[in-house]
Amino acid sequence: GQSLEQPSEVTAVEGAIVQINCTYQTSGFYGLSWYQQHDGGAPTFLSYNALDGLEETGRFSSFLSRSDSYGYLLLQELQMKDSASYFCAAVSGGYNKLIFGAGTRLAVHP
Amino acid sequence: GAVVSQHPSWVICKSGTSVKIECRSLDFQATTMFWYRQFPKQSLMLMATSNEGSKATYEQGVEKDKFLINHASLTLSTLTVTSAHPEDSSFYICSARDSGGLSNQPQHFGDGTRLSIL
């Protein structure tokens, strides 16, 4: 089967750094995406790693290691508005469909 | 760019009603669109892959006669929940990827449709 594992909850304070890990077991794997979703809203795209290594986009960075079937999302200089659910999603299959992890709920406190 | 519009945002209707949800890519063409369902505090579950001009590909366990998908143009896919019942109440979200872009283009999501069946 196909599965992605990520922590269910993470708590941090403003200004801190948080890393959300994701391990995956998928067939036809092309890459790992990360999405942010606020309560009641739609997922918004954060990053995509097709190759091993680190991708940096502003305060957010994402890493992939294909040999370890592992990736992470790094959030720096946390702000209150970063409180949301974060999903890792494997891109797989002929249509590049997304298979989502269960999501990590991030709570940022003052 | 890369805007996906989903309509309606909210639907409340009686059990037995059929409900149609539209998903449009506004500024790009999408050969393939995807339909997801999300229950409260849970992940997005892929229901089906919608292909322009051909039959949709349904994930295991999703009833194709219950969830009818039509992808008649490169910018529009529709999901019809037929004879909806309370257990079909959920948040339905579509996504699309720019067919004209690189293969690593991200999927962009609509704002979702919250369906409540009474």
Image (cartoon, coloured by chain):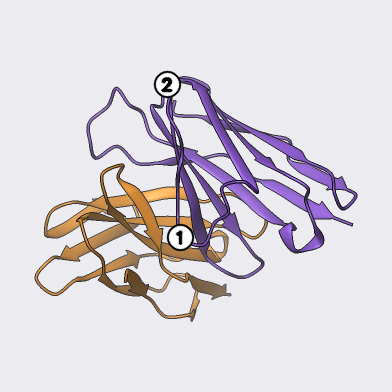
Query: Left of A29 or right of it: where is B1?
Result: right
Q: Residue A57: tell me if it is visible.
A: no
Q: Who's the residue at 38% across and 34% down the image?
A: B97
Callout 1 secondary element: loop
Judged by depth in the image, the label closer to the viewer, 2 or 1, is: 1
Q: Which chain is purple?
A: B
Residue at the disc numbered 1: B60
Residue at the disc numbered 2: B28
Nearest the eye: A8 or B44: B44
Residue A105 vertical placement versus B55 (above, below): below
Q: Do pointers 2 and 1 mark residues of a single chain?
A: yes
Q: CA distance from mark 2 to mark 1?
A: 29 Å
Q: Which chain is orange?
A: A
Q: Who's the residue at 9% across and 70% down the image?
A: A67
- Residue A29: x %, y % from top left: 21, 57
- Residue A89: x %, y % from top left: 36, 59
